[in-house]
Image (cartoon, rainbow, N blue to C red):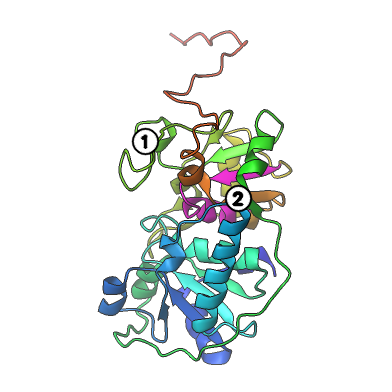
């Protein structure tokens, strides 16, 4: 599957629904879904809310949970799965979390609605308040993709040439808050030792239809500001794998081939006191270059 083909515009989705088997998955909460959604969409909030650990048992539960839920939503392997959220910058990357999970599970046909439901509305496309009744299917047993990192994988990468990319909000990066759910939701605040930071919002930009993903060149430029190149090995993390999923899609679309995600992220890492963290404000790297004189 071409990664550039993952993002789909509202008019393209409207055409796709009329021409081939599609399962549209709304990742918003039940009340928001009920107030109006893309016609035929299935509501699956667990795409966003499910908290996973990276132990063998935790990953088995993650796989089994979503194979069951996505099969119940109608995915057999023949249908294209299309995930959407309300807007790309307001849902913490929840639709992209669906894309990442299906990528991990090896599903062949996955798309994300670029701009989300806000873009669908802006395109004056139809909205429904009727819940769809999906035809349950058996989710296929497929060859899984090597995009999932465990806690042990991340530990082994500390102090190596692997780029640990933290994409959390700034208050989490500087250790003022432990999570988006509250400052003290997780037991420790801070970041992975040696991590670099690009806030996930920076991979999106405004458009007349709302926030959309930046172009591949723009994504590569954002990464260059943190010293990250397309040939680097990049390990992503956030709090629970949603914002990092947004970044995973942005980087894959921009030609970063060696990208994986620590899905357990800070929610898991912070709960093990034996694991090292950095705290406080990051320290600026000192420069060997002389300061530039200001012109008079």
User: Which residue is under mark 1?
Assistant: 171
Q: Is residue 286 above or below residue 86?
A: above
Q: Nearer the viewer, residue 12 or 88?
A: 88
The quadrant of the picture occupied by the C terminus is top left
The quadrant of the picture occupied by the N terminus is bottom right
Asked if the residues shown at circle 2 and circle 1 are in contact, with their CB atoms under 8 angstroms apart, the answer is: no
Classify mark 2: residues with Cα within 10 Å, few (<14), some (14-19) or many (20+).
Answer: many
The magenta region covers 233-251
Where residue 160 sits in the image (x, y, percent)?
Answer: 71, 31
For numbered disc 2, what is the local secondary structure? strand
The residue sitting at the front extreme is 57
Horizontal relation, residue 97 to residue 159: left or right: left
User: Which residue is under mark 2?
Assistant: 261
Q: Is residue 47 magenta?
A: no
Please give the name of the residue rendered at 35% of the width and 84% of the height, measured from the top-left corner. 126
Q: Is residue 17 above or below residue 31?
A: below
Picture quadrant where residue 168 is located:
top left
Q: Nearer the viewer, residue 130 or 290?
A: 130
For numbered disc 1, what is the local secondary structure? helix
């Amino acid at each position: 599957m071409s990664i550039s083909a993952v993002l789909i515009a509202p008019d393209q989705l409207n055409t796709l629904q009329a021409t081939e088997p599609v399962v549209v998955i709304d990742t918003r909460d039940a009340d928001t879904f009920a107030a109006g959604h893309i016609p035929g969409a299935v509501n699956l909030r667990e795409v966003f809310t499910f908290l996973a650990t990276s132990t063998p048992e935790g990953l088995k539960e993650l796989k089994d949970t979503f194979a069951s839920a996505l099969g119940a939503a109608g995915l057999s392997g023949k249908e294209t799965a299309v995930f959407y959220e309300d807007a790309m910058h307001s849902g913490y990357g929840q639709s992209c979390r669906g894309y990442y999970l299906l990528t991990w599970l090896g599903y062949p046909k996955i798309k994300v609605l670029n701009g989300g439901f806000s873009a669908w509305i802006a395109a004056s496309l139809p909205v429904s308040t009727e819940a769809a009744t999906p035809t349950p299917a058996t989710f296929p047993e497929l060859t899984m993709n090597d995009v999932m990192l465990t806690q042990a994988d991340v530990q082994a990468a500390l102090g190596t040439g692997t780029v640990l990319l933290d994409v959390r909000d700034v208050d989490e990066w500087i250790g003022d808050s432990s999570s988006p759910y509250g400052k003290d939701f997780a037991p420790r605040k801070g970041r992975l030792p040696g991590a670099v930071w690009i806030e996930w919002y920076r991979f999106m930009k405004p458009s007349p239809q709302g926030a959309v993903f930046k172009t591949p060149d723009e994504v590569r430029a954002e990464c260059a500001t943190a010293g990250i190149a397309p040939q680097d090995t990049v390990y992503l993390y956030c709090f629970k794998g949603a914002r990092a999923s947004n970044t995973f899609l942005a980087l894959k679309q921009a030609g970063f081939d060696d990208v994986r995600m620590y899905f357990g992220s800070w929610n898991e890492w912070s709960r093990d006191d034996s694991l090292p963290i950095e705290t406080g404000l990051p320290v600026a790297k000192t420069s060997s270059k002389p300061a530039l004189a200001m012109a008079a």
